[in-house]
């Protein structure tokens, strides 16, 4: 029983650490006003994934942080559902000191 309590405490502290880290990174830049750049990889996938860059940018500026795909030190994942077109955009970005760089993005039908 004591063994499970130690594992449980370890998992809880690691989750709390990740959540504080994400909050610190997101608060570093004002994502509503910061410059957003795109990786060349994204342009190669535009036709394949049927991406709309305006929706990708809106996902970054107004979307929710999806913590399961975030990695230390600066990789953040945003998700946003657009009800009128019934699609969810998922965007992986890298936070830098002065801008946000979009590494990859994809859309899926429904929520």
Image: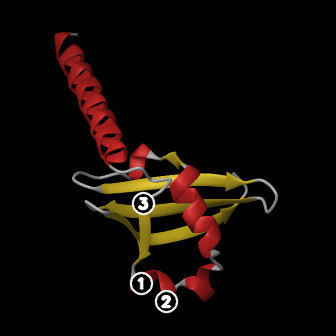
Q: Residue at x 55, y 65 (%)?
A: 57
Q: What mark, if any, has residue 41 been given in the picture? A: 1
Q: Nearer the viewer, residue 53 or 88?
A: 53
Which of the marked residues, 1 or 3, is nearer the chain's N terminus? Answer: 3
Residue farthest along the right direction in this orientation = 84
Q: Is 103 situated left or right of 15 in this image? A: right
Q: What mark, if any, has residue 44 been given in the picture? A: 2
Q: Residue at x 49, y 62 (%)?
A: 91
The count of marks equals 3
Q: Residue at x 33, y 35 (%)?
A: 19
Residue 32, image x, y percentages? 50, 53
Residue 51, image x, y percentages? 62, 76
Check if mark 1's residue and mark 2's residue have beta carbons within 8 Å. Answer: yes
Q: Nearer the viewer, mark 3 or mark 2?
A: 3
Check if mark 3's residue and mark 2's residue have beta carbons within 8 Å. Answer: no
Q: Is 92 situated left or right of 94 in this image? A: right
Residue 94, image x, y percentages? 33, 63
Q: Is 51 situated left or right of 60 in this image? A: right
Where 72 sits versus 104, above or below? above
**Residue to which mark 3 is pinned:** 34
- Distance from the alpha carbon under mark 1 to that under mark 3: 21 Å
Secondary element at tag 1? helix
Q: Is 9 situated left or right of 93 in this image? A: left
- Distance from the alpha carbon under mark 1 to that under mark 2: 5 Å
How crowded pointer 2 is (Cα within 10 Å; few <14, some 14-19, many 20+) is rated as: few
């Amino acid at each position: 029983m004591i063994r499970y309590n130690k594992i449980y405490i370890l998992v809880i502290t690691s989750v709390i650490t990740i959540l504080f880290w994400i909050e610190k990174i997101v608060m570093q830049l004002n994502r509503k006003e910061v410059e957003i750049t795109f990786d060349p990889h994204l342009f190669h996938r535009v036709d394949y994934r049927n991406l709309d860059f305006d929706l990708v940018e809106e996902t970054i500026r107004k979307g929710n942080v999806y913590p399961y795909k975030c990695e230390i030190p600066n990789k953040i994942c945003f998700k946003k559902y657009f009800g009128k077109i019934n699609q969810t955009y998922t965007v992986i970005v890298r936070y830098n000191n002065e801008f946000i760089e979009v590494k990859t993005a994809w859309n899926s039908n429904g929520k």
